[in-house]
Amino acid sequence: MSERLTAAVRRVFGGGDGLQGLMIQVAAILIAFIVGAAVLAVTGYSPVDAYVSMASGAFGSSYGVGQTLTQATPIVFTSIAFLIGLKAGLFNIGIEGQFLMGAMGATLAGVYLDGLPWVIHVPLTILVGMIAGALWSLIPAVLKSRFDAHEVITTMMLSYVATHFTSYLVNYPFKAPGWVAQSLKISGSAELPRILPPTQLSAAIFVAVIVTVASTYFLQKTIMGYELRATGLNPSAAENAGISIDRNILVSMALSGAVAGLGGACEVMGIHRRFIQGFSPGYGWDGLAVALVGGLNPVGSFFASVLFGALRSGGMIMTRATGVPLDIVKILQALVIMFVAAPKLIRALLRRER
Amino acid sequence: MSRDTEKIYIGAMAVIVVTYLIWLGLAVSGGMRPAAPTGDTVTKAEYDALRDQLSQVEAQLSQVQAELDEAQAQITLLSKPPKVGLVLATGGLGDKSFNDISFAGCVRAQEELGVEFDYVEPTAIAEYEGYHRDFAMSGEYMLIICIGFDQADALATVATEYPDQNFAIVDMVVDAPNVASLTFAANEGSFLLGVVAGLTTETGKVGFVGGMDIPLIRDFFEGYEAGALWANPEMEVLEPVFVGDWGDLTKGKELATSLIEAGADGIFAAAGGSGLGALGACDELDVTGYGVDACQCYLNDNMLASMTKRVDNAVYKMILDARVDVFQPGFYGGGLADGWVGMCRLSDEEALWEETFDFVHPEITEDILNKVIEAKNKIIGGDITVPTGYD
């Protein structure tokens, strides 16, 4: 079941070969924007005004660029987390839960491991976040390798468990005094510095770049990465070749969860400096879509994240300046995914043109 | 075409071509150059003086032009209506409560005061800071209004970054020199609701479902309890219960059901979205429900009255102050006397709510209303001191 799903997703979203694949992705995005313009026009807004204010909001100033990258950062982590799982043939759609657990782990380490110098505190906080994310994703991994429980079900359900569990923690045991359901602030020695004030862009963006490069290297150049990909492409062949399927399930899920947890940790350490209930507007879920839009490779995911980040940050400016509801951003995201999911169609159209 | 005409045409063409060639030749060889000036010569000194004069005039002209541009820019700026920014709470528009009422206040200001307003609907607490900064950075807004206590942290940060920008926050105190903090004496409005509950209960017991066990929500309960006991000293107000969440309808319903099972035949729900669950339970089990913040009586037929927080009046007052340039940052606490809290069955409100939500309230007796008005007047006059949830 899982192999067939993977193969189908690969066929539909794989992006295709080289330049043509890239062009098709770009064409899909353009078409999505054109359809989005039609939606705007039909609902009585000026598409030109909306897009101009969105584009100038997202890229027109250093503030805009900073906010775009701020919004992109968490999605870089969640999309790469998703694709690491998918490369091994696992649909880890519980990224949101691992992201939140990572954020919670980092928050607790940031708040309660006080009095350390930052050179120790920052890496330690990041590490705790990664471990928290990895542990959370190991539950479905063990359930799968031991009992063959399908990871789509378990990861998704555990994601809701994580949402409510972290919400419980900041409502009761770790609640900061006051009315808002949030934790205490992490100590200054665990903060990632803001690099472009007054935007919220933090050094987390560098971590995101490192993760992009490292995961590309890992998947393409290391034996373990090769084994993961082999498992994903054809599990029985991989097993015949002496690759342990169970071990690879555990490894890829743990890595996937660790990257998601790292994303949550960076979000807390760089932006909010505490765990606020409901701080994630669905970064984990966005990650699934962005990985697909990015053609299922880390570098593509990075740029697709920037696109989605720009939609969000530009959308915030747009909604203030033009009164267009922010929901149009969700429509655009959905359209991008739909059209990227239809590269076969676009490819066929391109072929007919020739 | 006959041969003759053809000849005439060719001849004419030839003449034209030849004339043109001659003209070209003359022009190129310089035969058509203007003749050199003969008289009217000026000396070098005169020429320099004239040129200086010219450049002086030109400088003056460009200065006048610049002044004109500036004046025109100012005219455009002044003729544009002043703007207000509105950052709604995470529930967004359509909540038929807090956000919708705040929005109504801005719409009223737009109609009556000639201001414009832009609004945003954040979906998570984490988004507030970005919106606040975005509004403040644009420099277009004479006042930025933030709805809801959970915006306080973000506003405290941004307000210090933009000390020249005026802000107002609803339901919370932010101690900054450019922020007006608007709070509401919820206990006073809840007192009136308690009076209604006390006079209508048949079992002699009423209950309260709160969103979270925090002073803000305790304030509703204290007023409600005091009002009920003032109107009906024989009755019992059950211990308040708290959902611990603003959006958990299921738990709100469960808690309300437990109160009804304990004998309550009137439930006051001050719990945001969770309150809708509690009021739903009242409808199912056929006991009286009491709403909060806005008139919620349109929800079902078992709703008798709602305590209202007139955020619209508060927001309107702030915009008015800013419009006539007397905006003062600081602490504002509004009660019954200011028209900042009320009860939807009072004659000055009932029609407004029924029009807004397009429904009709169930019957209420004259005696009850008179008692409510008596309570209101006594609170305003200082004869009744309503206990608060803040101590």
Image (spheres, helix red, strand yellow):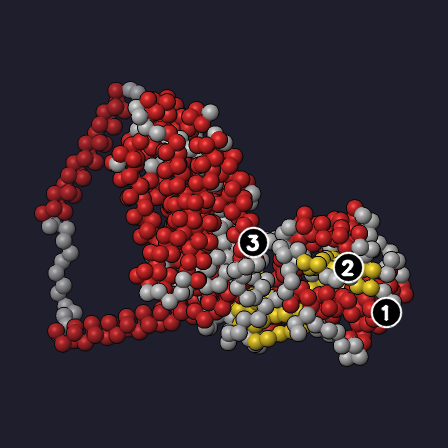
Label 3: few (<14), some or many (≥20) within 10 Å? some
Residue labelled with disc 3: A168
- As shown in the figure, which amino acid type bears the numbered disc 1? Pro
Residue labelled with disc 2: B207
Does A96 sit above or below residue A352?
below
Residue A318, image x, y percentages: 47, 52
- At 13% from the left and 65% from the top, the residue drawn is B38
Residue B134, image x, y percentages: 45, 60
- At 26% from the left and 34% from the top, the residue drawn is A223
Instruction: Output the chain of dot 3.
Output: A
- As shown in the figure, which amino acid type bears the numbered disc 2? Gly
Q: Nearer the viewer, residue A279 or A225?
A: A225
Q: CA distance from mark 3 to mark 1?
A: 39 Å
Does B46 sit above or below residue A280?
below
- At 61% from the left and 70% from the top, the residue drawn is B182
Q: Nearer the viewer, residue B25 or A149?
A: A149
Labels 2, 3: front one: 3
Discs 2, 1 touching: Cβ within 8 Å:
no
Discs 3, 1 touching: Cβ within 8 Å:
no
Q: Helix or strand or loop: what does disc 1 sit on?
A: loop
- As shown in the figure, which amino acid type bears the numbered disc 3? Tyr
Residue labelled with disc 1: B233
Numbered-mark total? 3
